[in-house]
Image: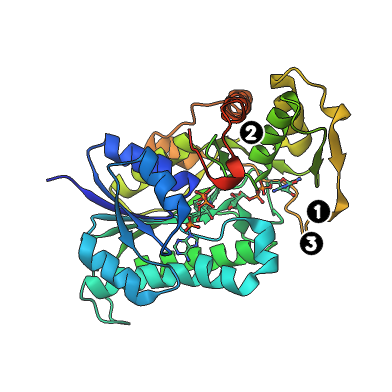
Amino acid sequence: MARRALITGITGQDGSYLAEHLLSEGYEVWGLARGQANPRVSRMRKLLSDVQVVRGDLLDQGSLISAVERVQPDEVYNLGAISFVPMSWEQAELTAEVTGMGVLRMLEAIRVCSGVSRGVSSAVGNIRFYQASSSEMFGQVTETPQNESTGFHPRSPYGVAKAYGHFLTQNYRESYGMFAVSGILFNHESPRRGAEFVTRKVTLGVARIKLGLATELRLGNLEARRDWGFAGDYVRAMHLMLRASKPEDYVIGTGRMKSVRELVQAAFTAAGLDWEQYVIVDQALHRPAEVDLLCADPKKARVQLGWEPTVSFDDLIAMMVESDLRLLTDGGDPDQDSSWP
Ligand code: NAP
Ligand code: G4F
């Protein structure tokens, strides 16, 4: 019988790539979707017609219990979150509820559906759980590159909420013997990345300028450095973690760091443009507390899971610029979630 997976965050970037990957591996895939008329659900359905949808919300414990009871999953991937770091200052409490407490609610749904009493140590059923942890937990880094033992110093309410979910996942593993793991993923991007994140903001900006639809691109801190990889590579790592023989946490990234300035250069160059003529630095886009640099040491994943990234930084940015040029040329509107390549 096919393995069954339940994915929260199915309408997001990673949810779509993970669903595609699991379907190609022969899984029956269910996505948890919230809201009564969520336009992102229809976008997802257009791309992934084989995914079955179950209604639920990370803010609603009962809905998660019902979803687990209905789907009877072998694997649960908790990708749902408020994931845009600046929003976490504007709506810190909501971020704590969705990105942090949502993890508790999902773990509790699995515990309850597996019939294990609260606070009693025993093995929880067979459901394997993946938590989408983040390199934002490292925040103001204590060493470079960062690995599974590097300490956390989160710099945003988002990073703090992710740290809570991360430790809770470890705690349920230790308390209840659950197969519960965290992937500490560094930034990963794609043509399906939300338009608010810097890579996509830049590639959409470049496409608009190239097509004469805009004359400038306003950005914040150009000196921040990140380890950017391709989302399609990173969802394979999530699956490998849940199929491993032992539940362990892994750092996933490329091990290479680039600045936002280098990202901008790469994107404008891919379209044959000179970035210095178009980019304006806007202080209003700087963050209250910045994460200056993030760089992964993915050795454990390479050695134990056999995981390797396949797409280089330059190829990733070129892929995104090309995709946005095509999208805008075809009359697509990324702000309306109208299309997804
Ligand atoms: P994304 O595109 O922003 O997707 C977020 C998903 O969370 C959406 O499907 C959204 O659904 C869902 N969601 C929001 N609030 C919810 C709620 N109350 N209940 C249920 N679902 C809710 O994020 P992503 O880039 O795919 O990232 C996936 C996960 O990995 C996130 O947890 C993110 O924090 C984490 N992560 C991402 C990266 C990265 O670089 N991409 C790196 C490390 C960790 P709606 O459509 O209903 O809004
Ligand atoms: O693309 P970003 O918004 O991603 P950020 O904050 O690194 O977070 C992403 O990666 C995390 C993993 O490390 C995830 F957990 C999280 O969910 C999300 O997917 O910003 C990247 C950098 C920052 O330093 C920011 O200050 O780009 C800088 N930046 C400069 N100008 C900008 C802009 N970021 C955005 N979004 N918009 C700008 O105009």
Residue 288 image label = 3
The kind of secondary structure element at disc 3 is loop
| Residue 299 percent across, percent down from the top left | 50, 38
The kind of secondary structure element at disc 1 is loop
Q: Indicate which label's residue lies in the foreground, 1 or 2.
A: 1
| Residue 238 percent across, percent down from the top left | 40, 45
Mark 1 beta carbon near ligand 2 (under 8 Å): yes
Whether residue 13 sits left or right of residue 314 in the image: it is: left
Q: Mark 2 is on which residue type?
A: Arg
Colouring method of the image: rainbow
Labels 1 & 2 near each other (Cβ < 8 A): no
Q: Does residue 222 appear in the picture of this structure?
A: no
Q: Residue at x 82, y 27 (%)?
A: 275
Residue 225 image label = none
- Which residue position holds label 2? 256
Q: Mark 1 is on which residue type?
A: His
Q: Nearer the viewer, residue 222 or 269?
A: 269
Relative to 87, is 257 above or below? above
Q: Nearer the viewer, residue 216 or 280?
A: 216
| Residue 167 percent across, percent down from the top left | 49, 67
How far, Cα to Cα, is label 1 from label 2?
Answer: 23 Å
Whether residue 163 sits left or right of residue 183 in the image: it is: right
How far, Cα to Cα, is label 2 from label 3?
Answer: 26 Å
Q: Indicate which label's residue lies in the foreground, 2 or 3.
A: 3
Q: Residue at x 86, y 48 (%)?
A: 282
Q: Earlier in the sequence, mark 2 or mark 3?
A: 2
- Which residue position holds label 1? 286
